[in-house]
Image: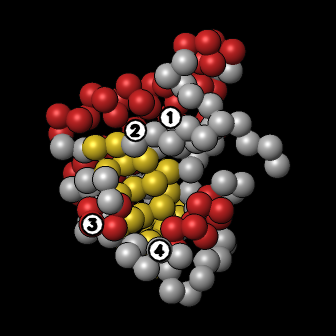
Amino acid sequence: MDLSENIQHSDWYKASGNLGPSILEALVTDPHLNVSILARQESTSTYPSHIKVHKTDYSEASLVSAFKGQDAVVSTVSGQAIRTQTSIIDAAIKAGVKRFIPSEFGSDTANPKAVELVPVFKGKESIVNYLKGKESDGLSWTCLCNGPFFD
């Protein structure tokens, strides 16, 4: 899929932290993408002035409002927040988002041995299964498994 033909407006869930800034930096260099960020209302994180920041209380109404007009949502949450992606996915569907990229970066959670060895992968696996169940609602999704991070 040529991303520039199908996805032009993307919203970023959790653009701070360890992984988010690196991915954000890569996305904003693509002139075909109009990137915005989803941030907690009380967040003090700063971003380049040309990037729209949607401040949210993470209620369904607030999320749907932030996602309206977006083609894709990219998530880079970590740890226990992995499971919070279900509410983000549901709001994305209600807002008409076309594609969701879950926080699946790292090891391939389709590998049962990886899920068995690393407990946090069970949450990632459940999100992938949740996304599979939402395909009938018109949401497509992509997992990006790039291997372990060493930083």
Q: CA distance from mark 4 to mark 1?
A: 30 Å
Q: Quadrant of residue 123?
A: top right
* Residue type for callout 2: Thr
**Rendered location of residue 102, percent (x, y):** 46, 43
- Mark 4 or mark 1: name the one nearer the start of the chain: 4
Q: CA distance from mark 3 to mark 4?
A: 12 Å
Q: Given this view, does label 3 or label 2 mark the residue nearer the observer? A: 3
Q: CA distance from mark 2 to mark 1?
A: 6 Å
Seen as rendered, the residue at the extreme right is 151
Q: Residue at x 55, y 38 (%)?
A: 145
Q: Given this view, does label 2 or label 4 mark the residue nearer the observer? A: 4
The answer to whether the residue labelled 1 contacts the one labelled 3, judged by CB atoms less than 8 Å apart, is no
**Rendered location of residue 59, percent (x, y):** 39, 54
Within 10 Å of the Cα at label 1, are there few (<14), some (14-19), or many (20+) other Cα atoms?
A: some
The answer to whether the residue labelled 2 contacts the one labelled 4, judged by CB atoms less than 8 Å apart, is no
Within 10 Å of the Cα at label 2, are there few (<14), some (14-19), or many (20+) other Cα atoms?
A: some
Q: Which residue is mark 1?
A: 83
Within 10 Å of the Cα at label 4, are there few (<14), some (14-19), or many (20+) other Cα atoms?
A: few
Q: Residue at x 65, y 77 (%)?
A: 46
- Mark 3 or mark 2: name the one nearer the start of the chain: 3
- Mark 2 or mark 4: name the one nearer the start of the chain: 4
* Residue type for callout 3: Glu
Does residue 96 lie above or below 90 as drawn?
below
Q: Which residue is mark 4?
A: 30
Q: Which residue is mark 2?
A: 86
Q: Quadrant of residue 32?
A: bottom left
What label does residue 133 carry, if any?
A: none
Q: CA distance from mark 3 to mark 2?
A: 27 Å
* Residue type for callout 4: Asp
Q: Which residue is mark 3?
A: 5
